[in-house]
Image (cartoon, rainbow, N blue to C red):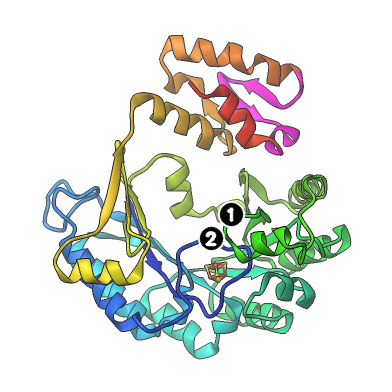
Amino acid sequence: MPGIYIHIPFCKQACHYCNFHFATSLHYKDELIAGLLKEIDLIPFPSPQVEKGDVNSERMETIYFGGGTPSLLGVDEIQMILNKIQQRFFVSENAEITLEANPDDITDEKLIGWKEAGINRLSIGVQSFFDEDLKWMNRAHNSRQAIGNLQLAIKHFENITIDLIYGTPGLTNEKWKQNVDTTILLNIPHLSCYALTVEPKTPLDKMIRQQQAENINPEKQSEQFLLLMQWMEEAGYEHYEISNFSKPGWRSRHNSSYWSGKNYLGIGPSAHSFNGTERQWNISNNKIYIESINKGIIPFEKEVLTAVQKLNEYIMTSLRTMEGLKLERLNEADADKLKSASRKFIDSGLMRSESNSLFLTKEGKLLADGIAADLFF
Ligand code: SF4
């Protein structure tokens, strides 16, 4: 079933490691929201998904407000966008509707408003419960807000996920355990964890090159990932995707649809869409996006995926999931090729084969991208 992603390209300040598309000035906020509403009207039919009124329409099963920082918007603005989506598409009655929120934006009033607007899942960008790490990342919140406002959110929402980052220079294994333990003790049903990466042209990249910041240590990152897998398993969470852990029944339906190759529609600057064969992405520039939408044109580029690209994407995404790579989904010749190519990884303990499927072992998960790339057709 299809899903919708809405990109809200504004943030209070730039986190040092971030390479997403966002602006720190709210100068174009009103025009941008008007643009999002207009883009929803402009989506051509047949769209990558479906339009209301089509008898064959599938229902939208998930809606995801990401960014950027969607929690910077007013509740009325979130409501307006959701109303527009409801007008244009069939939205399933039990759709998962997620809002990414930063701890410093969370208040009682907003939590009540988000719930009334239809949001039923919060994704909170905690990253760490330690001030020195948050400062190092240049996050807008502090540890008091991280814990206090997370506790506040729990009073209003059951379906909560938080993001944590590991492998930062100041994060010892003890502090990492405290971050994970806090999540478990608060009974948060879903956790996404990312190793800090140094993306080109980010402030962190510049700081490391100018020796103003310590570089990341890959061995420490591997150690912290292995510890994380152990702690989450002991706490009863499923490691259902390489960066994602959930209590049984609390997986992210929206993100799971990306990993299982389902269609999705992206709205807003830099948002990506996929219809099974074509991938398209909107321009990553707020001003040009608004100007183009005002002229009635969605500014995007697209690529048509070849059969080989689709196969390689399946290898990459399926190996990252708990369900693994199902060889029955490949033709016999490709499945045989893949089986022999994976033999060396199985022999070295990085992969395992079971019920005609291939999986990464814990050690293999440390090298997921490299292994997938090696298996590409
Ligand atoms: S809040 Fe999120 S999107 Fe914004 S700069 Fe920080 S990491 Fe990037």
Q: For numbered disc 1, what is the local secondary structure?
A: loop
Q: Farthest residue to the front: give it.
A: 210
Left or right of 213: which side holds 328?
left
Task: Please determine whether, in this image, residue 364 is positioned above or below residue 67.
Answer: above
Q: Position of residue 208 (x, y in %)?
A: 72, 60
Disc tally is: 2
Marks 1 and 2 close (CB-CB < 8 Å): yes
Residue drawn at (47%, 51%), measured in percent from left and top? 255
Q: Which residue is mark 1?
A: 200
Task: Please determine whether, in this image, residue 71 is positioned above or below residue 236.
Answer: below
State which quadrant residue 303 falls in: top left
For label 2, being within 8 Å of ligand 1 is answered: yes
The type of residue carrying mark 1 is Pro
Left or right of 241: which side holds 230?
right
The type of residue carrying mark 2 is Asn
Q: Which residues are magenta?
A: 348-366
Task: Please determine whether, in this image, residue 212 is positioned above or below residue 309.
Answer: below
Q: Position of residue 313 (x, y in %)?
A: 46, 33
Q: Is residue 40 magenta?
A: no
Q: Which residue is mark 2?
A: 19
Q: For numbered disc 2, what is the local secondary structure?
A: loop
Q: Position of residue 181 (x, y in %)?
A: 79, 64
Residue drawn at (26%, 71%), measured in percent from left and top? 290
Ligand 1 is in which quadrant of the figure? bottom right
Report crowding for label 1: few under 14, some 14 to 19, many 20 or more residues within 10 A (C-alpha): few
Q: Position of residue 322 (x, y in %)?
A: 60, 38
- Asked if one can make out residue 275 in the rendered structure from this viewpoint, the answer is no
